Image: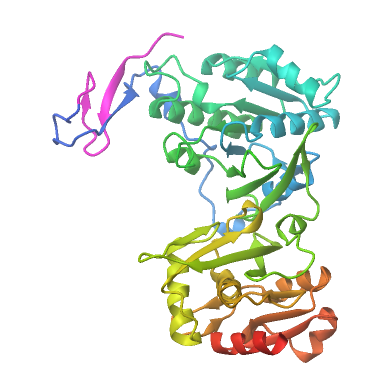
Amino acid sequence: MAKEKTVFTCTDCGGTCPKWLGKCPACGAWNTLIESVAESTSSAKHRFASLAKTAEVMALGDIEASDMARTPTGHEELDRVLGGGMVEGGVVLIGGDPGIGKSTLLLQALDSLQRSGQKTLYVTGEESGAQVALRAQRLGLLNSKVNVLAEIQLEKILSTLSATQPHIAVIDSIQTVYSDQLTSAPGSVAQVRECAAHLTRLAKASGICIVLVGHVTKEGALAGPRVLEHMVDTVLYFEGDTHSSFRLVRAIKNRFGAVNEIGVFAMTERGLKGVSNPSAIFLSQHAEPVPGSCVMVTLEGTRPLLVEIQALVDSGGPSPRRLSVGLDKDRLAMLLAVLHRHAGVACMDQDVFVNAVGGVRISEPAADLAVMLSIASSLRGKPLPKGFIAFGEVGLAGEVRPAPRGQERLKEAAKLGFSSAIVPKANAPKKSALKEFEGLTIHAVDRIEEAMQVVRALN
C-alpha cells in the first residue's frame, strides 16, 4: 500500500500545516496540532467511512429489535462482566496494569472458545509466537488450536482477518499496532485512533468479535485518546494488586449489558480461575469481633457483595491525618464532621485510617453508615456485635438515606448467616416479606444518632 501524505490538523480551528508546530499558525492555539492523513480522492472514501453500516431511514417503532446472540467464553466471571458472552461484531477494550493477567485471561478464553468449535485468532504485537506457546504450556493449554499471528502492521492484520474470518480475534495490544498511512510511531494518539477505527469498521462489516488490549497510564487510565473508549462497545478494567492473588474485572461501559458489573478471579499456577463466592474474599477473618470492623453490603452492577470496612483511630499530632483506601477521601472528612455534630463522636485530635478489605474500591455512598460505625467502634475500643452488618447513605443533617435495591442486599446478608443489621428505614422490608430474611434481625433507623443507640443496645 502506498504511503499517504500526512498533514497536521488543529483540533481547535481545523486548519492544517505541512509540519508540526507548537503554535497553530491559523488561530494561535498552543499544542493543538495532531498528525492526520491528507485527504485524497483515492483513499478518503475508505478512510472516513462510517464504523457501522449505513441503513435507510425508518421509524423507531418499525425497526425489529432482537436480542444479540452471545457466545459464552467458558469463564462464568468473564461472561458476567460481558453481559453473557461475546457478541458478533462487538468490539471489547480491556485495560490494566502490566503483569496483572490480561493476556493470560484472554488466552484462556480463546482456548475455551476454540475447544467449543469457535474459530479464534490471537494477534500478538509484544511477544513472539514461541513466547505465547510457552505461556500456554504453563497454563496447561496442551494441544491448543488457537491460531497465533505475531504482527504489528495494521494492513497485514486486516488482510489476515479478512482471509481467515475468525469468530473472535484478540489484538494484544492496540498500542503496538501501526498503519503505513501515518508516519508517527506506534502508540501515538494518531496511530491508536486510526488503527482502532479500522479494526472497529472491520468488526462491524464482517461480524468478527474483536478484543483490543490497551495499555494504561501511571494514573491507571487507558492510554491513548479518550475517543478510543467511545468507539468500542465494551470497556473492561483489570483491577487488583499484583502482590495479591485476586483480580477484579470491572465493566465501565457495555452496550450489550449492565455497567459496573465485576468479575472476581484468583491467580493460580494454571492461570486465572473464577471465584464463585467473592464475598468470602472481602469478609473478616477474625475468630472474634474486633474494634473498628464493620461489614457492609455493596452493589457491583447486579451483584451484592459483602465487604469488611476497617477503621483505626489513634492519637494524632497537631495536624491529624485522614487516610482512606478504597473509599473517597473527601467523603471521609465529611462523615467525620457529621459524626461529631450529630452523634457527639469527636475525632478532631485523632488520626483516622479507613480501609476496604481485599483491595475493593467502593464508590457508592451506601458505605457511609458502615464507615461511621467502624470509626466509633475503634475510638471507643468496643467491637460491633458478631454477625452484624450495616449500610445506608448519611446526609449532612445526620439523616440516614436509603440505598438502592436494599432488599437484595439484605437477602445476601441473610444467605451468608448474618444475624443483625442496621439499615435505613426506607429499606426495611414489610412484615409480609420478613420470612425471606429468617434469622436476620433488622433495625431500621432514620438518623445516625438512632444507629449509635442501637449499637449500644446490642453491645
Residue 178 in view (yes/no) = yes
Residue at image location 58% in from the left, 66% down from the top: 311
Chief SS of the magenta region = loop
- In the image: residue 197, left or right of residue 203: left
In the image, residue 359 sits, relative to residue 339, either above or below, namely above
- In the image: residue 261, left or right of residue 30: right
Residue at image location 23% in from the left, 19% down from the top: 19
Asked if residue 95 lies in the magenta stretch, the reply is: no
Where is the C terminus found, in terms of image quarters?
Answer: bottom right
- In the image: residue 104, left or right of residue 13: right
Which segment did they paint magenta?
A: 1-21
Residue 22: x and y in percent read 19, 28
Residue 113: x and y in percent read 79, 32
Residue 273: x and y in percent read 78, 41
Give the quadrant of residue 189.
Answer: top left
Residue at image location 75% in from the left, 17% down from the top: 134
Q: What number of labels is visible?
A: 0
